[in-house]
Image: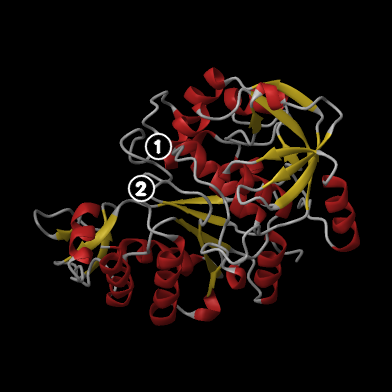
Amino acid sequence: MSGLIAPHGGSLVNCVVTGAEADKLRKEAEGLKRIDLTAKQSCDLEMIGIGAFSPLNGFMGKADFESVCKSMTLASGDIWPIPILLSVDKADAPAVGDRVALYAPNGVLQGLMTVEEVYAHDKKLEIPNVFRTEDSAHPGVKQVQDEGDTCLAGPVQVVTVCVDPEGPEAFLDHRKTPAETREIFSSRGWSTVAAFQTRNPIHRAHEYLCKCAQEICDGLLIHPLVGETKPGDIPAAVRMDCYNVLIENYFVPDRTCLTVMPAAMRYAGPREAVLHALIRKNYGVTHFIVGRDHAGVGDYYGTYDAQNIFNDLDKANLAIEPLKFEHAAWSNKAQGMVSGKTFPKLEGDQIFLSGTKVREMLGKGERPPAEFSRPEVADVLIKWATSAN
């Protein structure tokens, strides 16, 4: 795997404990103080454990937290845009030096942690810096506002990676760690890999971005986020059906890889775009597709803020190459997908459909135009939308 991009910070972290050692830790956990994780914290613990958050080997201490908020770097100087915190209510906080047991929201023991720091959760520092707003209507802001006022920091040991293997978002056949995706890329002879981040079905515009990236890289990783998302997002199982039918009919299997990323969404726009890029770097990806309003919500961020933020980063430390795409759509005159860079904008020429209009059509059992969505994808969504109604 020497030809692959180095993980962020230089080496891939692995905090997952297996076999007899894991059994020993489970026994130890029975006598430890219990910490019940939120859905976001549970996702973060899994991402730390498998190395997707390398170089982190645990939840952040105060120095890293403050540095990330203020300068978008860890205390070490490595780029890092969003705090990864374990916050609890002050009354529930253990003492420094304590060992604690970390339980997922469904009650499964997920890991253990040695508490090295206990410090105040400075939400006044975190929220405006990370989200560029303090509006509680923003789902990421509200999430932080509702979190505990005290942060616990220290290294973790993960004993259960997928805490709900029977759950709708487990996807065990597509659930690959960074070490595993790196092995896949190496076995296929890929040294340059583009990744497409998505929490929605892939429509024609997204497909166009993926195909452009495939032209300049050895392979493509379609890497949907299946961790915690906001209410109203299309269920991960439905999205996976859409990805599979699209790859089967419109992509070259030998040049395309589909695995899932169990991260939680923050909806932090520009900063989250950087986090998503660094995560993919750890998975072995060299090029990361950054589209319009990446990881945004509502109108909190400018259309291309998530692309422009990369201009100010240390390119050597970032290492992964952002692929910045304009908004794309089907042009009747060009008879193909175009963007503002590739074709003049003509009145009434391009096919745009609002999310509201698409949902309305799907709910009625109607396919959107083939220029907007592949019919096979539309049929999967129609099945879901009509059954949901």
The reply, left or right, for residue 200 in relation to residue 46 is left
The reply, left or right, for residue 290 in relation to residue 8 is left
Q: Residues within 10 Å of mark 1 (few under 14, many from 20)?
A: some
Which residue: 47% across, 23% down? 128
Which residue: 68% across, 57% down? 5
Which residue: 40% across, 27% down? 136
Q: Compared with residue 216, is residue 356 higher up or lower down, i.e. above or below?
A: above
The amino acid pointed to by label 2 is: Arg
Element class at badge 1: helix
The amino acid pointed to by label 1 is: Asp
Where is residue 377 drawn, in percent x and y? 33, 72
Element class at badge 2: loop
Look at the image and tell me in which quarter the C terminus lies. bottom left
State the separation of the CA atoms marked 1 and 2: 9 Å
Q: Compared with residue 58, is residue 367 higher up or lower down, i.e. above or below?
A: below
Mark 1 near mark 2, Cβ–Cβ under 8 Å? no
Report the residue marked by disc 2: 292
Nearer-N-terminus badge (1/2): 2
The reply, left or right, for residue 328 in relation to residue 286 is left
Where is residue 267 drawn, in percent x and y? 44, 40
Which residue: 83% across, 46% down? 30
Report the residue marked by disc 1: 305
Where is residue 374 drawn, in percent x and y? 29, 73
